[in-house]
Amino acid sequence: MADVPDIVQEVYLRMLRIPNIESVRSPEAYLFTVAQHVVQQHTLRQSATPPSIELTEMLEIPSVTPDIDPVLATDAAQCVEQLQGAIEELSPKVRAAFLLHRRDGLSIEEIGTRLGLSRPMVKKYLMKALMHFRQRLEQVQ
Amino acid sequence: MDRPVQSRINTQIYEEASEWFIDCRAGDLDEAARAEFDRWLRKSPEHQSAYLEMAAIWNEGPILDPTHRWSVEALIAQASTDCANVIALDRGSRPGPRQPAPGPRPTQAVQPTQANLPSTTVQSVSMADSGRPVRSPARRRLLAVAACILVIGGWLTYLRTPQVLFETALGEQRSFALKDGSTIQLNSLSRVRIRYTDQQRTVELLQGQVLFNVAKDSTRPFTVLSGQTRIKAVGTQFDVYRKENDTVVTVVEGRVAVVPPPLSVDSPAPPENPQFLSAGEQIAVNPRVARRIANPNLAGAVAWTRRQLIFDSASLTDVATEFNRYNERKLVIDPSALGTLHISGIFSSTDPTSLIRFLRNRPELRVIETSREIKVESNR
């Protein structure tokens, strides 16, 4: 796990070097790109060809990765199991919003209609789900 | 927002991160909001890290209900009977021009799965903490970030510093000097992976047994991983033997902390509960139990470094297991011979002659030697 804080730090420093005028178009895309590059450089020491990645795919790529360090993979698997357990702990509305959106692909609007909720309310429930999951990850040893 | 001091990212940052993240997913950020989001991301590494964690969790969404425990209908039915509509609003958690709500915003580009309705600014949702103490936040954060980088990066193969692998063949023993002045001595059929960074020295015991002689460096803790058991040392000498079911740790000098693995991934993680061991102490750890050995045979534990095996009323099975770690010709104990006797004494690990002679002299046992194995049976 040793390098993770280094990577976080480096991502931050590089992000600061990008002019706002550029990053402001899509701050999220810039964060992901920078993080990707930093991690790639750490990886490069082991493989000669950097994989090329479409930015838009970034959030859609499955998490299965070859040659993952067993400890890291175990940790990640543990995180997923924690998250699976945490689904149950969500309040029914939060669970419905999250699963309908992420599992069943319903849009925020569709969920609002089906559950009789306003769009901002659906978004709040999605945030609430994220916050609960994150808190649950805190308990992973 | 009362959080223990040691929590490095406070809840407010996470709340803000989740809010920005959902706004991004909903396509609700206009130019001014994006500029503000950009400023927010540039505030600190913690802000970025929190955001990446949210992205990682989000990314796992599709697989979080693998058994489809809730149908769409069930989800909707349960939600409609849920009266807990009220979410506490925490005004002011996000500073800047987005507060207060400016009313409907211009619509944004349509996202594939989401139509665009005008929305009012979403205010921060206060997720009241349950008041649980934060356990091992540094470790947890590393995990979360690691998982996150793993996940966001299907592109990521591996993010560590170069690693070095050392291994020994059957009957072989070798010592290696590491660059920090520590030495590791590998017993027969052992394998370790070494990773040194500026912050940490990590050795994974993949197989076998190693005697560690750790050079003091308080700025870079030395950690041995044996399965999911972690052994932490500063400057000390200790032996770690990864057996089939247990990891046995013997401290020769100094002091180490042994952190047993969690009981199971399903159970709530127990607080990290390290066992501190001083010189002369021994512990056997497996996923179920961490058991201190009373009156450990210290000399026996490290006798392998002198190519000796020291037994103190050991069972025939244990004796065979130990011999077979060093010798091509295996000692096979027939079930009929089990429990017949216990063995004490000092033997050469690479030369079983004296042991065989000893066994042959037992009237209750029969020893059959072939080129491949040495079989021990009951004589009755």
Image: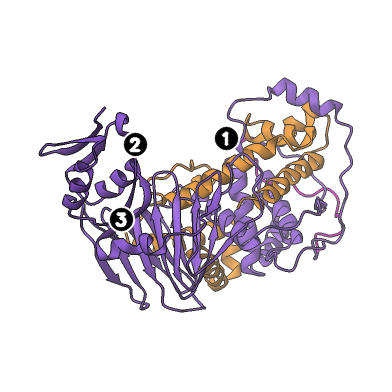
Chain colours: A orange, B purple
Indicate whether residue B107 is drawn in magenta: yes
Please report whichever mark, 2 or 1, sits nearer to the chain's N-terminal start: 1
Q: State the image quarter where residue A82 is shown.
A: top right
Q: Residue furthest front?
A: B363
In what element is the residue under mark 1? helix
| Tag 2 and tag 3 share a subunit | yes
Dot 3: chain letter: B
* Three-letter amino acid code at the position of disc 1: Ile
Is residue A20 in view? yes
Q: Badge 3 is on which residue? A: B345
Q: State the image quarter where residue B83 is shown.
A: top right
- What separation in Å lies between label 2 and label 1 (alpha carbons)? 54 Å
| Residue in front for this viewpoint, B99 or B206 | B206
| Tag 3 and tag 1 share a subunit | yes
What span is colored magenta in the figure?
B97-113
Is residue B107 in view? no
Q: Quadrant of the N terminus of chain B?
A: bottom right
- What separation in Å lies between label 2 and label 3 (alpha carbons)? 17 Å
Please report whichever mark, 3 or 1, sits nearer to the chain's N-terminal start: 1
Contact? badges 2 and 3 (CB < 8 Å): no
Q: Badge 1 is on which residue? A: B63
